[in-house]
Structure formats: structure tokens, C-alpha cells
Image (cartoon, rainbow, N blue to C red):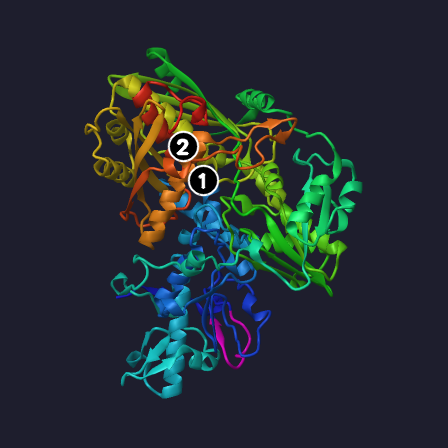
């Protein structure tokens, strides 16, 4: 039997009376309804009751408000609705929808709360629930934090079930056949005699029916899509090169633009001389913008060439001029004045230090750029009191609000059209490129402006992952890890990012110590302290945020302690682990990799474990130590997500996360001189080459009851697992990234 979900009538997002030809269904809100955005701009032949499913004469369209930047969220969202609504996979149409508080994220804020994922106490559970309420109150429509699946898993299935039940009631009303004698299949209601009535022909009747107050979700035994291998909705277009990304868009009458602003982030401008640029072929107009200038031309290449010909007199940066000074700033932050949090403080670390030899180490990781393949771009048209924006974004509602402030136009006159993105990794949680395009559009009202950053502008104006340092101390006793004291210093990603979005950032920044303070290891004397370094270069979320660096900082020193104790890296972690799901994850990766077996001459392995975004992930990396350097052979990954929704996409997400984590750990860093990022294109910002990529074997575990996301959790264990393998091969401890400062890779 399916689970019965009670939905109080007053909590539905109810629209106006039916409009002939169509109907839209959706999910319930809390006690105070949020306006249904589908009602704002209905075409002839459409109707809307609630926000997630629209049915008109062309078929069924599922609204997928979480952005797709290559991770497959449109397909997953569509599958959750389609599972309950009974639509044939090949008939599904998706639409990201317009920005609206109705599509608020009820999950994402939970990651910033001072409760470990393993904490199932009454207080922790209620705090997470309050995070969902706050998400609604603030209207946070955001894609990030591996929150799409946890937020949508039940919400969108209920949306589909409500739509299905309403259509069944409509069919019963039209035919006189009792509801319990009707069923659904592939976009139609099936009558007892086998005849079918298409959903499209029932829309007009369904629009006049109040949605039912209770719906039964299908039992797992009847699932057609969830848990099965599903072809991505975009796979054909991507495979044939016909998918339109934001950068591919073309509009009638469109002009092309590019901009330059101070590469010293936030530094401002004294003046500029555009004499040479004005004489260049194809240049139509040069427009001053905040912090720089933009060029309007007849194609993007000419716009970029011309804007680079402008002579700018930039102001200095407000932060330290070079990386050495930045490191000194972070190093000087391990003081009581900068103490931000101490969320882990168990046992008596000082007493343990007095009784045994203290092992100490310092680690550091650099700034890292997002560097997605598609540089920042947007098309903006301001015409007749209406503003239209076409771009890829993870924050569409915030972008609308920004445009409202910049133009003074009412929100109903501003339209954000979310496009498919060619990568992001957190980069499109920012909106400065759209702000610039709006400024250009305001200077050329009535003309569509397509603004594209050069790769150099994109790299030098990134909001990178922050640099971090750690100081760690610990002791071992009787062949076991006895104490672990970890101090981490970094600027606050949360404060920097939310400040630009105009959102509050109160209390300690959990990102500084994420995937360190909350690890499920019962070390007798265990302390983790976060220190907030002054903000220097403005920073932002980077795939797996604070966990991306702390996975390395925490695991690397834990490995040092385990080695000092003479213990086995897997067995000691299992002994210390006090969380059942994490223990099973470690056991699984040990079994997958045949841990402890002889790999043969010159072959070695390393292990790491991180719990981030509620997901335990264990990784074992096998390498060969060749005469020319380290060769990566295999990576085994086990992770616990509660439910694998699509095995193919799940595997791809994990493989991509491992490659992302390893490639950056091996070769990438962002350094600064005279306040400017020195790596301004891919030739200077290295990553893993295809010939270096290892085989990656994946196992998804489904022991937990909470359904989790997988986009970010594979990243944190990758670097420390590789570092552990390199130590096993060479005896060299890598305490600074990237690793190519210490070893060569082949």
C-alpha cells in the first residue's frame, strides 16, 4: 500500500477559476499560501491551480525550478513528479519556470546549522525543520548544497500524486464511472473497459475541482522511474550538439558586448582612455559601468578585443597585494580575537598532551577558482518598461530582486529566463555579470545586449574558494589514537557570499570547520576550533564549500596519528567510528578494494573518509610509483545516500566529484600578485588530464532513512586519500596543496 499523505485544503496554492484548455498542479505550502507564479502570465488555452505541473493541449510540462548546470537536476525533478503522475518518460516536457518564493528551498539552510548530521536529537531535528520555515520566509530559491534531491524527494512526488488524483476525479465526473474503478498510465486515465482518456482532454474539468485533501503515494514496488536507470532528458541534445546553453542564445536585433572591471576585486577605477578602442572594427559604443567599461560591437570577439584595448587606471585593492602576505594574514588569525567556533570539545586534550608525546603538523590549501567551461554571460533587454534577462543562474529570485533595485521597475515587469549552464561548481551563485549587462541595457534601451566575459575576465573576477590553514596536535597510546586537536583558520565564505546577496549572516560560520568538527569518530580527547581570518579576496561557495578543504585537513593529520600509533588506516577508523551508517560505508569500501591485500610491486593505496552534507563517503585510491612519477590507477568509492534515484546519474556524479577533487588537489591553485589573480586562463590553471584519470568504481548504499544529494560529498575525501597513497609509496607527507609542488604525476 502507498503511504497516505494528508494535505489540509487551506494549505494548497489555489489559483483563480479554470481557464479553458489547461490546468496546472503543484505542491502545498505551509499555512500561509504563496501566490502561484503560473497564474501571472497564462497563455490562451492554459490554466493554473498550483505551481509544479502544467497541462495544456500540447501535453504535460513539469516545472523544474532547481537549476541544471550539468548535474541532471531537470531529469531528477521530472522523474519524481512523473513517477506519481504516470507520464511516459518520452512525453515529459520540462520548464525551469519563473523565479518565485513558491519554489523556496526548505533544505539548504540546514547545512549551516551547528548540528552534526549524525545528531538526531529533538533539538537538532526541530532546528532543521525551522531551517525549512526560514527558507520559506526568506523566499530562498537556490540550487546548491546538494539539496535538490533531499528537498524535492517527497515534495515533488506529492505534487504528482495530487495532480493524478485530481485528474482521476475529473475523469469520474466526466464519465460517471466511480473513481475506484479508474487507473492511470502514460498520461491517460484508463476506464474499466480499457479505453483511455488523455490528461489533456481532462484539464478543463480538473481545473474546476478542488485538489483532494489526501493522496496515496505509490509503493516502491510500483515505481517505474525512481531507482531505475533513466536516460537524461537532455542526453540526445547534448550528444548531438544541439542543446542550447545560455551562451548559445541568439535574438533578433541583438548586439554583442564584453566588459572589463578592476581585476583587483572591488578596487574601483580612476579613469580610462578608450581612444584606440573606438577606432577598432565593429565597435558601436563604449559604455562606462560600475568599476570599468563595456564595449558594444557586432560580434563577441570584436567586443573582447576592443575592451582589452582600453587603457584603464585601476585603483589598488583593499586586501594584501600578494599571496605571501595573504598567507601571513591567515596565519596570524589563530588568536582568541579571531576565534569563531569550537563545536567539538570532548575529553581533556591538554591532559592528554601532558601524558604522551605530542605529534604536530601544519597544513595549508590555496585559493581555487571555479573556472566552468562556459564563461559568465547574459542577454538583457530593457524595452517599454519591461526587463528580460536570459542567463544561467542558481539564484533566479535573488537576481530578479537585484534587477528590481537597479532599475526601479516593479517585480512583475522583470522576467528572468533561466538557461542551461555549461558548468558552475558554485560560480553561478553570484550575479555581478548580470548586473553589468543590466547597466549596458539601460544605456541602450530597446536593444537586446548579449554580454560575454572573456576567459581572462572570468578567471580574474571569480569569487574563489578561500585559502585555509590548519594547526593540528595529537597523541597516541597503546596503538590507538588518543587525542586530536585541530585548529582551522580561513575567511568566512558565508559572510562574504551572503553579504553580496543582501542576506544576513549571524553567528559562527560553520563552513570554516565543516567536515572536521562533525566527523563520526569517538576519539577520547577531541577538539576542533575555527578561526575567522579577515576577508581578503571576496570569496564564494565552491563545490562542497568548506568540506572541500577540511576533508584534506582533517583526514591528512588523522592519517599521521594512525601511522604513529602503528594502526591500520581502515581498522582504526572503524574502531573509532560511532555512527552505524558511516561504519557500513567504511566496511563497504574496504570490501570493494580488497583492503589489506598485496597490490604487487610499486603499487600502493590510501584511504580517506568524510561525512559532508549528511552523506558518509569513503574512498580508496590505488597508485603506482613509477620512475617518472605517481600514476593513478583506481578509485573505489562507497557512499550512503538513503536512496539512489538514478543509478547512471548517481555514478556519473560521483565520478565527476572524484575527478574534480583529485584534479584540483594535484595541480590547481589561484595565486595573487599586485592584488590580481595570476592564473587567468586554463593554461595557467592546471587540472587532471584525460590520460591521468583513474578507473572509478562506485557503490551507493541505501541503509539510511533520509534521502541525500550526491553532487558534492565525493569531493572532500579525494585529496586526502591520494595524499595517504603517496605517503605509502614515498614516505613523503604532503601538507600543502597542490601536490605537484611535492611529487610529479604521470
Q: Position of residue 91 (x, y in %)?
A: 40, 70
Residue 658 horizontal side relative to residue 312, left or right? left
* Residue occupying image coordinates x 43% and y 73%: 211
Q: Answer few, some or many: residues within 10 Å of disc 2's Cα (few below 14, many 20 plus, some between 14 and 19).
A: many
Q: Position of residue 47 (x, y in %)?
A: 52, 75
**Extreme front residue here?**
281
List the residue tagged with mark 2.
551
Q: Is residue 18 magenta?
A: yes
List the residue tagged with mark 1.
544
Check the picture and name the quadrant holding the C terminus: top left
Q: Are marks 2 and 1 in contact (CB under 8 Å)?
A: yes
Q: Position of residue 241 (x, y in %)?
A: 47, 57
Q: Which residues are magenta?
A: 14-24
Tag 1, which secondary structure? Answer: loop
Check the picture and name the quadrant holding the N terminus: bottom left
Q: Nearer the viewer, residue 335 or 736?
A: 736
**Extreme left residue here?**
597
In this orientation, does residue 406 appear?
Answer: no
Pick whichever of labels 2 and 1 is earlier in the sequence: 1
Tag 2, which secondary structure? Answer: helix
The majority secondary structure of the magenta stretch comes to loop
* Residue occupying image coordinates x 64% and y 48%: 301
* Residue occupying image coordinates x 52% and y 73%: 48
Residue 231 horizontal side relative to residue 237, left or right? left
From the viewer's perspective, is residue 646 above or below residue 457? below
Q: Is residue 239 magenta?
A: no
From the viewer's perspective, is residue 55 above or below residue 492? below
- Which dot marks residue 613? none
Find the distance from the CA under tag 2 to the CA under tag 1: 10 Å
From the viewer's perspective, is residue 52 above or below residue 366? below
Q: Position of residue 25 (x, y in %)?
A: 46, 70
Amino acid at each position: 500500500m502507498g503511504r497516505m499523505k494528508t494535505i489540509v485544503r487551506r494549505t494548497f496554492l489555489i489559483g483563480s477559476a479554470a481557464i479553458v484548455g489547461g490546468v496546472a498542479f503543484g505542491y502545498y505550502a505551509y499555512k500561509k499560501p504563496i501566490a502561484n507564479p503560473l497564474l501571472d502570465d497564462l497563455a490562451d488555452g492554459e490554466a493554473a491551480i498550483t505551481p509544479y505541473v502544467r497541462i495544456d493541449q500540447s501535453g504535460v510540462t513539469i516545472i523544474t525550478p532547481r537549476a541544471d548546470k550539468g548535474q541532471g537536476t531537470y531529469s531528477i525533478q521530472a522523474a519524481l513528479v512523473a513517477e506519481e503522475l504516470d507520464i511516459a518518460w518520452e512525453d515529459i516536457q520540462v520548464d525551469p519556470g519563473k523565479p518565485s518564493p513558491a519554489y523556496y528551498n526548505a533544505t539548504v539552510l540546514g547545512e549551516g546549522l551547528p548540528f552534526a548530521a549524525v545528531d538526531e536529537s529533538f533539538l537538532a531535528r526541530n532546528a532543521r525543520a525551522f531551517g525549512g520555515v526560514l527558507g520559506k520566509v526568506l523566499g530562498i530559491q537556490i540550487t546548491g548544497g546538494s539539496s535538490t534531491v533531499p528537498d524535492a524527494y517527497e515534495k515533488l512526488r506529492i505534487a504528482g500524486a495530487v495532480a493524478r488524483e485530481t485528474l482521476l476525479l475529473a475523469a469520474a465526473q466526466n464519465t460517471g464511472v466511480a473513481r475506484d474503478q479508474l487507473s492511470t498510465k502514460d498520461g491517460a486515465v484508463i476506464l474499466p473497459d480499457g479505453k483511455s482518456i488523455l490528461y489533456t482532454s481532462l484539464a478543463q474539468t480538473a481545473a474546476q475541482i478542488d485538489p483532494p485533501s489526501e493522496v496515496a503515494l505509490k509503493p516502491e514496488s510500483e515505481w517505474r522511474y525512481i531507482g531505475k536507470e533513466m536516460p537524461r532528458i537532455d542526453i540526445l541534445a547534448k550528444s548531438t550538439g544541439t542543446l542550447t546553453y545560455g551562451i548559445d542564445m541568439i535574438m533578433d536585433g541583438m548586439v554583442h558586448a564584453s566588459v572589463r572591471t578592476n581585476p583587483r576585486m572591488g578596487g574601483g577605477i580612476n579613469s580610462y582612455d578608450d581612444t584606440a578602442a573606438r577606432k577598432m572594427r565593429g565597435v558601436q559604443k563604449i559604455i562606462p559601468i560600475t568599476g570599468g567599461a563595456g564595449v558594444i560591437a557586432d560580434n563577441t570577439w570584436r567586443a573582447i578585443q576592443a575592451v582589452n584595448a582600453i587603457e584603464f587606471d585601476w585603483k589598488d585593492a583593499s586586501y594584501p597585494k600578494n599571496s605571501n602576505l595573504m598567507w601571513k594574514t591567515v596565519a596570524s588569525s589563530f588568536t582568541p580575537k579571531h576565534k569563531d567556533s569550537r563545536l567539538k570539545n570532548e575529553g581533556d586534550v591538554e591532559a592528554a598532551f601532558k601524558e604522551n608525546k605530542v605529534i604536530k603538523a601544519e597544513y595549508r590549501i590555496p585559493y581555487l577558482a571555479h573556472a566552468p567551461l562556459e564563461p559568465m554571460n547574459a542577454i538583457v533587454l530593457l524595452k517599454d518598461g519591461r526587463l528580460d534577462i536570459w542567463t544561467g543562474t542558481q539564484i533566479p529570485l535573488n537576481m530578479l530582486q537585484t534587477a528590481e533595485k537597479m532599475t526601479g521597475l516593479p517585480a512583475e515587469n522583470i522576467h528572468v529566463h533561466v538557461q542551461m549552464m555549461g558548468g558552475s561548481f558554485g560560480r553561478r551563485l553570484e550575479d555581478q555579470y548580470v548586473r553589468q549587462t543590466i547597466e549596458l541595457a539601460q544605456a541602450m534601451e530597446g536593444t537586446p545586449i548579449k554580454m560575454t566575459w572573456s576567459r581572462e575576465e572570468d578567471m580574474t573576477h571569480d569569487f574563489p574558494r578561500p585559502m585555509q590553514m590548519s594547526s593540528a596536535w595529537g597523541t597516541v597510546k597503546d596503538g590507538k589514537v588518543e587525542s586530536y586537536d585541530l585548529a582551522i583558520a580561513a575567511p568566512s565564505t558565508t559572510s562574504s557570499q551572503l553579504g553580496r546577496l543582501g542576506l544576513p549572516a549571524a553567528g559562527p560560520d560553520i563552513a570554516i570547520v565543516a567536515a572536521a568538527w562533525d566527523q563520526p569518530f569517538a576519539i577520547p580527547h577531541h577538539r576542533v576550533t575555527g578561526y575567522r581570518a579577515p576577508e581578503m579576496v571576496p570569496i564564494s561557495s565552491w563545490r562542497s564549500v568548506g568540506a572541500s578543504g577540511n576533508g584534506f585537513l582533517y583526514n591528512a593529520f588523522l592519517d599521521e596519528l594512525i601511522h604513529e600509533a602503528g594502526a591500520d588506516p581502515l581498522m582504526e577508523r572503524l574502531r573509532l567510528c560511532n555512527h552505524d551508517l558511516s561504519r557500513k560505508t567504511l566496511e563497504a569500501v574496504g570490501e570493494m578494494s580488497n583492503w589489506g591485500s598485496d597490490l604487487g610491486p610499486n603499487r600502493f593505496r590510501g584511504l580517506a573518509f568524510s561525512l559532508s552534507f549528511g552523506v558518509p563517503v569513503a574512498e580508496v585510491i590505488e597508485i603506482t610509483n613509477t620512475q617518472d612519477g605517481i600514476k593513478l590507477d583506481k578509485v573505489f568509492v562507497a557512499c550512503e545516500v538513503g536512496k539512489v534515484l538514478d543509478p547512471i546519474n548517481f555514478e556519473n556524479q560521483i565520478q565527476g566529484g572524484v575527478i574534480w577533487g583529485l584534479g584540483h588537489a594535484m595541480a590547481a591553485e589561484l595565486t595573487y600578485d599586485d592584488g590580481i589573480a595570476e592564473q587567468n586562463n586554463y593554461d595557467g590553471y592546471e587540472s587532471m588530464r584525460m590520460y591521468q584519470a583513474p578507473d572509478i568504481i562506485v557503490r551507493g548504499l541505501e541503509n539510511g532513512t533520509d534521502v541525500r544529494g550526491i553532487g558534492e560529498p565525493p569531493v572532500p575525501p579525494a585529496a586526502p586519500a591520494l595524499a595517504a597513497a603517496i605517503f605509502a609509496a614515498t614516505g613523503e607527507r604532503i601538507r600543502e596543496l597542490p601536490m605537484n609542488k611535492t611529487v610529479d604525476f604521470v
